[in-house]
Image (cartoon, rainbow, N blue to C red):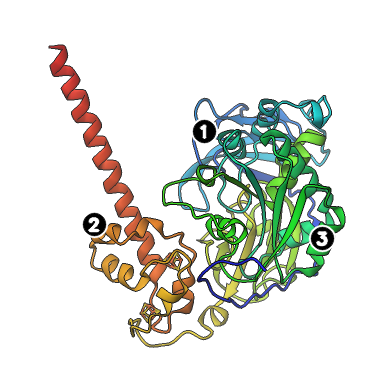
Amino acid sequence: MYTFKGGTHVREYKNTSSAPIERMPAPATVAIPLSQHIGAPCKPLVSPGDHVDYGQLIGEVEQGLGCPVHASVSGKVLKIEKRLSAQGMPVDVIVLENDGLYTCSPQIKPFPKPLEEAAPEEIVEVIRASGIAGMGGATFPTYAKLQSAIGKADTLIINCAECEPFITANHRMMLEHPERIMGGTQVLMKALGLRSALIGVEDNKPDAIAALRAKAPDGIQICVLKTKYPQGDERQLMYALLGREMPTGKLPADVGCVIFNTETVAAIWHAFFNGTPLCKRVVTIDGDCIGRPANVKVPLGTSYRDLIEYCGGLIKRPERVINGGPMMGNAQWDFNATITKGSSSILVLSHDFCEKGHSKQPPACIRCGRCVKNCPMHLLPNMLVNLAMRHRYDDAAAYHAMSCVECGTCSYNCPGGMQIVQHIRVAKGAIRAAQMAAKARAAAQMEEKKGEVKQ
Ligand code: SF4
Ligand code: SF4
């Protein structure tokens, strides 16, 4: 069985693993952010009052890295306004009024040739134009990841680990649509010029493993991973399957690998074979405050409020709302925020649930060493939290704070109740800011020198 060093066994709470994917009817309005990816935000291509069709391109990146956005309903553009993203950043959103007609855009067309005749650059362009960004939560533009791996990667890995507690959207996708995962994988293999691929699934999903194996064509191998958090982290997955380690600051392609998430691969299948851009995604909605926990295929731009209503509403007073999993997700403060390309799950938890098992004592390190033993990146989290709390960010950098993947394993296991990962995140932000300031200073000095030479 494949595994990595370190990590931890977290309580799974996979309450929705037997809940089939439901299709939520699109709400009366959707609010589609123009930035749902890493990179430059899109410029709107529509104005208030315009009519849009389902799947129509409504926002495009003018230059640089980024993903276009498409209408997830047909109807009318009501307004374009600023709202806060799930990460708390102000972004422009296009608010669409749903006319309920679902008229499809004439822009939706499958790729005109069979896969065998598609050139790598044509596949990259299909994926770019479809607006696909990493749907495991990373939201890195998929076309850019693929483009940078062509000619460099000798191994394609599909990440079906889904190791975060609560989330089962990928599990359901593997059970219900294994052929889409296989089809998307074959599109990627064609683009990369590879004859084989590995699909990694944790051993807590035997039914999904069987479903994938039943559909796997020659060359696609289903690899069973030991269930352990954070098995879905790219570094741990690569190490478990191939024994390859990735230095900090490098990409998987630098060590010959390229890794895509389950639903991203299914979106590639849709884009290539049906011509459908990324307008919907499967979201797990769970937590003890939700009336009817479920897996739901949701039009992008649907508000948390509408999704929660669809899932039976709130049955308890919510204490915490999380976009993503409980280990790595972002806390939310607004039920009007919307589902985007990276929203794998929405969790709504009560005070009692959040406090369960928490000590009432003030946090303190008791030097048990558990965080060091479990850190999958082999760091010294106890040292890092200490330095971060003292604002000794240079020292934290020297102790490799930037190698922390923010998996939260250390905080989860800490008997002293230390908020380790939160402090490391702050330290990383400060280190990044200092590095950027140093770069800007160096660039300014360089410009100054150039000016002197000219004179
Ligand atoms: S797990 Fe917590 S208490 Fe134990 S060494 Fe690490 S920070 Fe200290
Ligand atoms: S220090 Fe970072 S990588 Fe290590 S366990 Fe904590 S959050 Fe994960």
Quadrant in which the C terminus is drawn = top left
Residue furthest out toward the right: 214
Image spot of residue 72 (x, y percent): 72, 41
* Label at residue 20: none
Q: Is mark 1 within 8 Å of ligand 2?
A: no
Q: Nearer the viewer, mark 1 or mark 2?
A: 2
Kindly identify the amino acid type of the residue bearing the numbered disc 3: Leu
The alpha-carbon separation of the residues under discs 1 and 3 comes to 33 Å
Instruction: Name the residue at 49% across, 71% down.
Output: 409
For this orientation, the residue located farthest to the top is 455
Compared with 156, 310 (above or below) is below
Disc 3 secondary structure class: helix
Mark 3 and mark 2: Cα distance apart in space:
47 Å
What crowding class fits label 1: few (fewer than 14 Cα within 10 Å), some (14-19), or many (20 or more)? Answer: some
Q: CA distance from mark 1 to mark 2?
A: 30 Å
Which residue bears the numbered disc 2? 394
**Figure quadrant of residue 111:** top right
Where residue 65 is drawn, which disc sits there?
1
Q: Is residue 109 visible?
A: no
Mark 3 highlights which residue?
175
Q: Residues within 10 Å of mark 3 (few under 14, many from 20)?
A: some
Q: Earlier in the sequence, mark 3 or mark 2?
A: 3
